[in-house]
Image (cartoon, grey):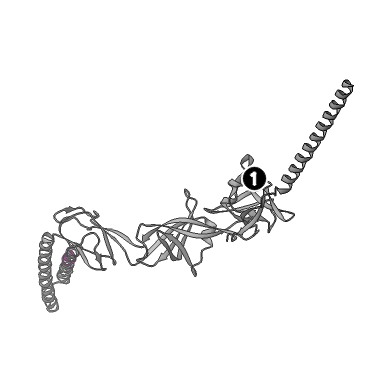
Amino acid sequence: MSGTSRRLGARTSVALAAITVAILIFGVSTLRADATSQVTPPPPLPVAVVAADYASDASIEEFFPGMVAARRQSALGFERGGRIDVIGVDVGDHVQGGDVLAVLDTRAVVAQIAAADAQTAEAAAQTALTAGTEVRQAQLLERGHISQQRLDEVRTATRAARARESAAAAAADAIRVQLDLAEMTAPFDGVVTARLADEGTIAAPGQPLLELIENGSLEIRVGLPPALAASLNADRPYRFVVDGGSINARFRASTGIVDQQSRSVTVLFDIEPGTVAVGQIVRLAMATPIDADGFWVPTSALAEGRRGLWTVYVLQPDRDDYRLEGRVVETVRIEADRVFVRGAVADGELVLASGLARITPGLRVAPAVLEARAQ
């Protein structure tokens, strides 16, 4: 009896253990099911997007440097040498055309003029004497007291005297011209930009002493590709970018000759005085066409791909959401903040505009901001 009781007790213990394990398994399964039913997927990530807008007539604004220059600029000096007596202007002075800027010592020239005038007077006296002699000889010829040969000799002497008188007067006038050239005058309205000598300096003929720049008429010289230079129109203004803003200028002329080194054509634009300074660098803004079909995206939309290619991420519809899908594109033109691309993106598809560092392909997203299309 005791053995039978023990066997019954053992069977009862096993049955109880099996029931307990079954209860535990059921409880754990129930807890897991409850936990699983309580976990929800995260919401789609809001992202900024831009719509692909294909354009066949897109253009890009390019900038071509140019320099502001005066239409007239002269290095002034004296035609003849001498000691500088007066320099009446300094750097920065504004002068009018015809103003006297500098004067040479003219004492020697004045003395030469006096000597030339004396020679002219002497020649005039000789002319008067020979002319009177010619008249008297003509009267004697009429009376038969002299020969025709004698009268011809007197007439020749008279003509020679008049020639000597004319030569003396011309020499005196030439010296007076030297007196005029001893004064340096402004050839046009302008501003003095350099003073290279002072009073007392012995100036050589043609030595630059002052530099004068015309301040009433300015121009911009720009080198452009031949095709772009040929497209300029004098009837419309062109925009130039300068420090702190922009100015307008009008096309005036083109050389029409391609420079062998720069392979560009020099073109000239007129600008109003006072807007920029002579020697300042400006940039001509020109819209040049892009000979390719494509669309603009922000530079922040590009991700570097394999083998030097670029990738953009397109929002692909997935039930009620979107998932990111990488597409390979080719960059056609690049600006500071946008890129013109073409590739496996359909017109109107939404492209991720920014935030590449926080996304992965296949990520569930939602377009939160539709950025303006680049124009």
Whether residue 75 is visible: yes
Please identify the dominant SS of the magenta region. helix
Report the residue at 68% width, 59% height from top.
348
Q: Residue at x 69, y 53 (%)?
A: 322
Position of residue 161 relative to residue 319, above or below, is below
Q: Nearer the viewer, residue 24 or 263?
A: 24
Q: Disc 1 residue type? A: Thr
- Give percent across and percent down for residue 218: 37, 64
Query: Could you tell me residue 166's position as x and y percent?
Result: 18, 68
Q: Position of residue 262 (x, y in %)?
A: 47, 50
Along the viewing direction, whichever of 293 and 173 lies nearer the viewer = 293
Is residue 153 among the parts visible in the rendering?
no
The quarter of the picture where residue 246 lies is bottom left
Image location (x, y in percent) of residue 123: 12, 67
Residue 341 forms part of the magenta stretch: no
Q: Quadrant of the N terminus?
A: top right
Identify residue for label 1.
360
- Give the quadrant of residue 151: bottom left
Q: Is residue 279 left or right of residue 289?
A: left
Looking at this rendering, what residue extends furthest in the front direction?
1
The residue drawn where x is 58% and y is 46% is: 357
Residue drawn at 47 percent across, 52 percent down: 259
Label 1: element kind: loop
In the image, residue 171 lies in the stretch drawn in magenta: yes
Q: Quadrant of the C terminus?
A: bottom right
For this orientation, the residue located farthest to the top is 3
Magenta stretch in the rendered image? 168-173
Mark 1 Cα shell of 10 Å, populated few (<14), some (14-19), many (≥20): few
Does residue 153 lie above or below 208 as drawn? below
